[in-house]
Image (spheres, coloured by chain):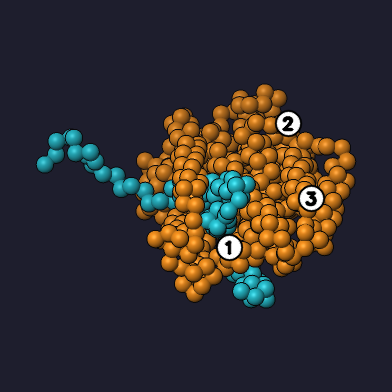
């Protein structure tokens, strides 16, 4: 990719980011921050590329730590966001005798 | 070579898959801005991430599988365990920590790129070197700043603002030094000094510590959000260096959406971002009454946020007062109650004996609006329920909810029985302003951290909330 192509992509992506976030309810600020936080864990790909093509022992070490960090960022980020958003999931319908031990037909 | 290798690095196949991945990120973030779609949005973004990671692992020539699998395995395990164990109240510091490791990953990748460039022994092109330097500095600042934010929120270090004398001057000098060192590396791009590069990482680390240390715990969410945006930008810079379109788009998306989000968060807290970063204020609000005319920090929200809090609660208690009578808001409030019940929320009305201007005032008004009698609870009956109540909505009531009556023996209303809304998980106060009530004293409730003020006419506010709930 030429530098100018990359800059074009960068500017367009910046505008997408500005536009996509508009009037977020306060309640969603933290989950959304957490979700975008997980997305920048994509930098782990850099670690995979570094280690995947490395041939120098210090690069192995640096790259592997980067992968560990990136994987924590991604996995933890998405999981924590999911937990936070649990409060928005549908309430379970009150079910009579949910576990079936009550002896109904 | 591995049997899995099938995509040419930078080739059409890999790029196409990266495009799918970042499209899913954009859709995911978009859905994350609305409560009904947020959970799904998060899953969509996670699916995008899975595609991006899989694509990279399939690149032709990727080797060292032992290390790749070990790194992925350890990171995944730590991430899973940490996010399952964390308490809901500790979420902000968890996000800070995840943001920090992301920044750390960026800085490490930048370091490795520089080493790689030096080892090749020829000139490193500036369009690769400059993004690497940017990624190194911002990643390192973000890593250390986030760790300090985590430590503060986790009470590992004092949460109150720590002022270092000459703070701003030291920060400015550090920044100048970092820029000068970067320029040095860029000028000597045919043989850059690795020692200077490591010095840049260290200086950026010190800067990250110094910038966040003076900021108080109350402002930390804004700081974490800002560092999040920075980490995004540094990931994009790493994408420039590695010629990776997924990194550029995803990083930039986080950078720009994170910036907007940071400003919205600061606005919601009545602060500006500059104020948060440079004022060194925002520790625990100082105790005591706060003299008349003195602005005390409070949180204000709009009808939409109020509707979301209510609609996703299990139990809601509505506390009507004189303001409801003045605004003739009883029908609108009943409508809010009806909408909530349709969604399976338990709704009760707490009637203080002297709410309004005469005994029974509220009962009459609410009965006129056809509120079922069983939902009208006396003070003695509802107070024990308050700690189990998710949201208490105070509509135009003031003195009868003032916790000073039980907490402050010097208060003019000391000893007066109150509806203990301060015991509820969250409180929404619908009121026209912060002005004192009948007794002429400030209401401490308005400044509690779990209280949100909705400044509006009670009738209008109730109508707005009802229609927002319908739209959810």
Disc 2 crowd, CA 10 A, few/some/many (<14, 14-19, 20+): few
In this rendering, would B300 be left or right of B89? Answer: right
Residue A68, image x, y percentages:
54, 46
In this rendering, would B406 be left or right of B8? Answer: right
Q: Residue furthest left?
A: A105
- Name which of mark 1 and mark 3 comes first in the sequence: 3
Q: Residue at x 57, y 68 (%)?
A: B245
Question: What number is the disc on residue B183?
Answer: none
Quadrant position of residue A25 = bottom right
The tally of labels here is: 3
Q: Nearer the viewer, residue A74 or B411?
A: A74
Chain under disc 2: B
Q: Which residue is mark 3?
A: B196
Chain identifier matching the cyan colour in the rendered picture? A
Chain under disc 1: B
Question: What number is the disc on residue B288?
Answer: 2
Chain B's shade in the image? Answer: orange
Q: Nearer the viewer, residue B347 or B185?
A: B185
Q: Which residue is mark 1?
A: B247
Looking at the rendered structure, the secondary structure element under dot 2 is loop
């Amino acid at each position: 990719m030429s530098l100018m192509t990359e800059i074009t992509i960068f500017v367009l992506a910046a505008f997408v980011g500005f536009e996509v976030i508009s009037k977020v309810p306060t309640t969603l600020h933290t989950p959304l921050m957490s979700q975008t936080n997980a997305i920048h864990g994509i930098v782990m790909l850099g670690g995979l590329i570094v280690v995947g093509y490395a041939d120098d022992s210090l690069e192995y070490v640096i790259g592997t730590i980067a992968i560990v960090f990136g994987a924590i960022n991604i996995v933890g980020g998405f999981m924590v966001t999911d937990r936070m958003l649990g409060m928005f999931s549908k309430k379970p319908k009150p079910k009579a005798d949910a576990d079936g031990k009550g002896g109904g037909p | 070579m591995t049997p899995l290798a099938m995509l040419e690095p930078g080739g059409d196949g890999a790029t196409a898959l990266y495009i799918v991945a970042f499209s899913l990120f954009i859709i995911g973030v978009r859905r994350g801005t609305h409560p009904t779609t947020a959970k799904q949005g998060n899953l969509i973004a996670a699916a995008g991430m899975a595609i991006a990671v899989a694509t990279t692992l399939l690149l032709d020539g990727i080797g060292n599988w032992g290390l790749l699998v070990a790194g992925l395995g350890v990171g995944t395990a730590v991430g899973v365990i940490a996010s399952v164990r964390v308490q809901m109240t500790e979420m902000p510091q968890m996000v800070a920590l995840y943001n920090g490791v992301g920044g750390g990953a960026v800085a490490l990748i930048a370091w490795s790129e520089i080493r790689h460039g030096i080892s090749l022994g020829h000139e490193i092109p500036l369009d690769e070197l400059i993004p690497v330097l940017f990624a190194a500095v911002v990643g390192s600042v973000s890593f250390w700043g986030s760790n300090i934010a985590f430590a503060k929120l986790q009470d590992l270090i004092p949460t109150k603002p720590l002022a270092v004398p000459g703070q701003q001057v030291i920060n400015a000098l550090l920044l100048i030094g970092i820029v000068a060192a970067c320029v040095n590396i860029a000028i000597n791009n045919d043989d850059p000094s690795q020692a200077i590069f490591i010095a840049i990482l260290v200086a950026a680390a010190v800067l990250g510590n110094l910038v966040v240390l003076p900021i108080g715990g109350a402002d930390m969410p804004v700081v974490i959000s800002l560092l999040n945006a920075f980490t995004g930008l540094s990931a994009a810079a790493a994408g420039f260096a590695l010629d990776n379109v997924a990194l550029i788009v995803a990083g930039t998306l986080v950078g720009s959406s994170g910036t907007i989000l940071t400003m919205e968060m600061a606005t919601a807290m009545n602060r500006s971002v500059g104020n948060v970063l440079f004022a060194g204020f925002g520790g625990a609000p100082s105790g005591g009454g706060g003299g008349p005319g003195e602005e005390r920090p409070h949180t204000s929200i709009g009808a939409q946020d109020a509707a979301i809090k209510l609609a996703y609660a299990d139990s809601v208690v509505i506390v009507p007062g004189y303001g409801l009578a003045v605004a003739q808001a009883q029908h609108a409030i009943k409508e809010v109650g009806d909408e909530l019940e349709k969604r399976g929320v338990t709704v009760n009305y707490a009637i203080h004996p002297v709410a309004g201007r005469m005994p029974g005032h509220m009962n009459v008004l609410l009965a006129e609006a056809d509120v079922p009698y069983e939902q009208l609870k006396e003070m003695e009956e509802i107070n024990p329920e308050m700690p189990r109540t998710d949201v208490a909505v105070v509509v135009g009531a003031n003195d009868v909810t003032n916790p000073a009556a039980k907490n402050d023996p010097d208060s003019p209303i000391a000893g007066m029985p109150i509806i203990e809304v301060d015991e509820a998980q969250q409180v929404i106060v619908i009121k026209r302003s912060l002005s004192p009530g009948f007794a002429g004293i400030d209401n401490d409730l308005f400044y509690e951290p779990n209280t949100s003020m909705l400044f509006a006419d009670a009738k209008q506010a109730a109508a707005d909330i009802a229609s927002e709930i319908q739209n959810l």
